[in-house]
């Protein structure tokens, strides 16, 4: 059985432009490269504020956490200037993983899109 991850990318406006990644499916070792590639594509196109909507993620393994860490390191040295990576509306399973492993202290996590956009 293979995992799938669907990613929709859209532009929103907070106090600054924000690239929103709406994720649906599993974020694990078999899908993390897809996420990293999409993020790299956005960063290469000038995006430096990234928001990941995790409401549709039904499973996230340690590889998903490593992907977010790699993306955050990449955006910190983006050519357009240091950017921000934030998470919004994690599903219950993802929220448990973030809290259990302490990543909710490393990443800014918002409960809704409006507050997340205003935070940029």
Image: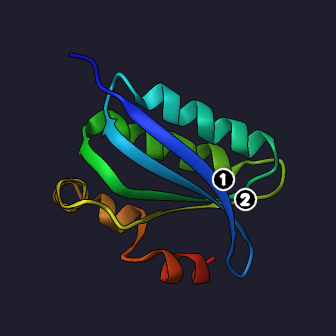
Residue 78, image x and y in percent? 75, 48
Q: Is 82 placed above or below 72 here?
A: below
Foreground pick, 114 / 79: 114
Residue at 18%, 61% (x, y): give it: 92
> Label 2, on which residue?
82
Few, some or many C-alpha atoms within 10 Å of disc 1 (few <14, some 14-19, many ≥20)?
Answer: some
- SS at circle 1: helix
Residue at 35%, 28% (x, y): give it: 4
Foreground pick, 79 / 3: 3
Q: Position of 99 compared to 14: left or right?
A: left
CB atoms of marks 1 and 2 within 8 Å: yes
Residue at 49%, 53% (x, y): give it: 22
Residue 23, image x and y in percent? 43, 47
Q: Give the quadrant of the C terminus.
A: bottom right
Foreground pick, 37 / 11: 11
Residue at 60%, 30% (x, y): give it: 37
Give residue 17's mark.
none
Q: Position of 105 compared to 95: left or right?
A: right
> Label 1, on which residue?
76
Residue 13, image x and y in percent? 71, 74
How far is mark 1 from mark 2, CA to CA? 4 Å
Q: Give the quadrant of the N terminus.
A: top left
* Residue 66, quarter of the rendered image: top left
Few, some or many C-alpha atoms within 10 Å of disc 2 (few <14, some 14-19, many ≥20)?
Answer: some
* Sequence-earlier tag: 1 or 2: 1
């Amino acid at each position: 059985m293979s995992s799938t991850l669907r990613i929709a990318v859209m532009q929103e406006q907070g106090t600054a432009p924000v690239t929103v990644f709406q994720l649906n499916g599993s974020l694990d070792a078999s899908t993390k490269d897809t996420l990293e590639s999409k993020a790299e594509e956005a960063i290469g196109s000038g995006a430096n504020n990234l928001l990941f909507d995790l409401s549709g993620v039904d499973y996230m393994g340690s590889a998903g956490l490593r992907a977010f860490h790699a993306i955050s390191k990449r955006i910190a040295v983006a050519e357009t200037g240091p950017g921000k990576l934030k998470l919004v509306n994690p599903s219950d399973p993802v929220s448990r993983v973030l809290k259990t492993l302490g990543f909710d202290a490393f990443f800014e996590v918002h409960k809704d899109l409006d507050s997340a956009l205003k935070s940029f």
